[in-house]
Amino acid sequence: MSKSETAKRVKIKVELSVPSHPDWVQVILDNFDEFLQDHANCERKAVAQAMGLAMRYPERRELIPHLIRLAKEELEHFEEVYELMQARDLPLVKEIKDPYVNGLLEHCRSGHDDRFLDRMLISSIIEARGAERFGIVAEALSDPELKAFYHRLWAAEMKHGHLFANQMLHYFSEDVIRTRLQELLDLEGELIQRLEWRPSLH
Ligand SMILES: [Fe+2]
Ligand SMILES: [Fe+2]
């Protein structure tokens, strides 16, 4: 079986090694405006990141259509969060530092293929954590419109979480992907427990 056939048949599930702390969401509920500003920043960065990958890896042809679709979807999310912000007269902020993403990227190995795999698996993990937390926020919110919005985002980011890891089946063996994914998931679990809580997605 060729690697492209394998990519269609095997599903690699990206399952977080530790759940978010149950009290984390209170920080979000208490500072919801700041959370929206951070959320908008994350969606804006997700668009740029998808396009950045399409620029960095033009030879990974199977991936490009997915990256284009992803960038469009993340752009829609950005638009939707920005509309919520406009309704509250909240401005976008320039850049919000993200020790979570930076901490994960530190684990990227060097070497063309290793780096590619790590970047893509880390992208999957970031999406999976984002999905988990949007789900928690949706559960905790009482406003029905906001609740529905975050529920929809939970579903979208869940899909993104599996996308990158499964696309790697075009380029790497399932064993190589699973082993590295587990290592990175364990590192992410340690990181997420260490980080200070802010009114942010991560
Ligand atoms: Fe998104
Ligand atoms: Fe996403």
Image: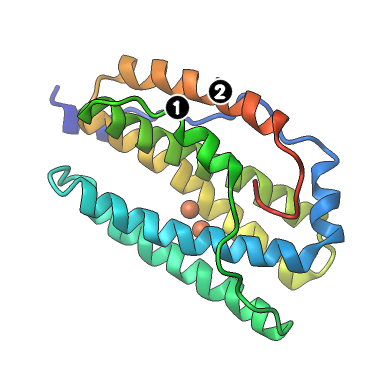
Where residue 86 appears, as percent x and y from the top left, is 65, 84
Left or right: 115, with 19 as reference point: left
x, y percent for residue 177: 35, 22
Q: Is residue 86 left or right of residue 185?
A: right
Count neighbours of disc 2 (C-alpha within 10 A) and say few if under 14, some if 14 to 19, many if 20 or more: some
Q: Is residue 86 left or right of residue 28?
A: left
2 or 1: tag closer to the N-terminus = 1
Instruction: Residue 49: name its quadrant.
Output: bottom left
The reply to whether dot 2 and dot 1 touch (C-beta < 8 Å) is: yes
Q: Secondary structure at mark 1?
A: loop
Q: Nearer the viewer, residue 4 or 31?
A: 31
* Labelled disc at residue 187: 2
- Residue at horizontal 73%, vertical 65%? 34
Kind of residue sitting beneath label 1 = His
Answer yes or no: disc 2 within 8 Å of ligand 2. no
In the rendered image, which residue does mark 1 sit on? 107
Q: CA distance from mark 2 to mark 1?
A: 8 Å
Quadrant of the snapshot with the N terminus:
top left
* 88 is higher (above) or lower (below) than 124: below
* Crowd tier of the residue under label 1, counting other residues whose Cα lies within 10 Å: few below 14, some 14–19, many 20 or above: some
Q: Position of residue 163 (x, y in %)?
A: 38, 42
- The disc labelled 2 sits on which kind of residue? Leu
